[in-house]
């Protein structure tokens, strides 16, 4: 598991955009988008496109516990 750190840049009701600034494994940059459930108390999905070191990758999670699987 990788932990990402960042700044929430925009929130549009159920959608949140976060600018990733670092990770527990080193430098990380780009953005992540999260979609909240109707009650806005849980995450339905997370999509991230980022660079970790020299590697680029995309992660999408849509299970019931995105915070753990992401």
Image (cartoon, grey):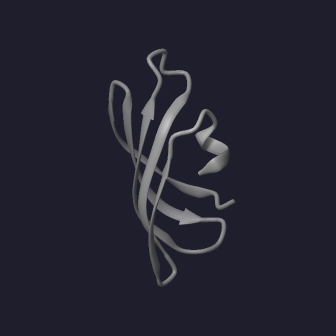
Decide if residue 5 is on the left or right side of residue 60: right
The residue lying furthest to the top in this view is: 39
Residue drawn at the location 46% of the way across and 29% of the way down: 36
Residue drawn at the location 47% of the way across and 84% of the way down: 54
Residue drawn at the location 45% of the way across and 69% of the way down: 57
Q: Position of residue 64 (x, y in %)?
A: 61, 33
Please determine whether, in this image, residue 26 is positioned above or below residue 37.
below
Q: How many marks?
A: 0
Q: Position of residue 23 (x, y in %)?
A: 59, 65
| Near-viewer residue (16 or 68) | 68
Please determine whether, in this image, residue 33 is positioned above or below residue 42.
below
The residue lying furthest to the bottom in this view is: 54
Residue drawn at the location 49% of the way across and 15% of the way down: 39
Q: Tell me where residue 66 sits by quadrant.
A: top right
In the rendered view of the protein, which quadrant contains the N terminus? bottom right
Q: Position of residue 30 (x, y in %)?
A: 38, 63
Q: Tell me where residue 34 sits by quadrant.
A: top left
| Near-viewer residue (25 or 65) | 65
Q: Tell me where residue 48 sits by quadrant.
A: bottom left
| Near-viewer residue (33 or 7) | 33
């Amino acid at each position: 598991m990788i932990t990402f750190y960042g700044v929430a840049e925009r929130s549009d009701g159920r959608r949140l955009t976060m600018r990733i600034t670092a990770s527990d494994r080193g430098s990380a940059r780009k953005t992540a988008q999260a979609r909240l459930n109707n009650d806005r108390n849980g995450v339905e999905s997370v999509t991230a496109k980022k660079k970790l070191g020299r590697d680029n990758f995309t992660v999408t999670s849509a299970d019931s516990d995105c915070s753990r699987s992401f």
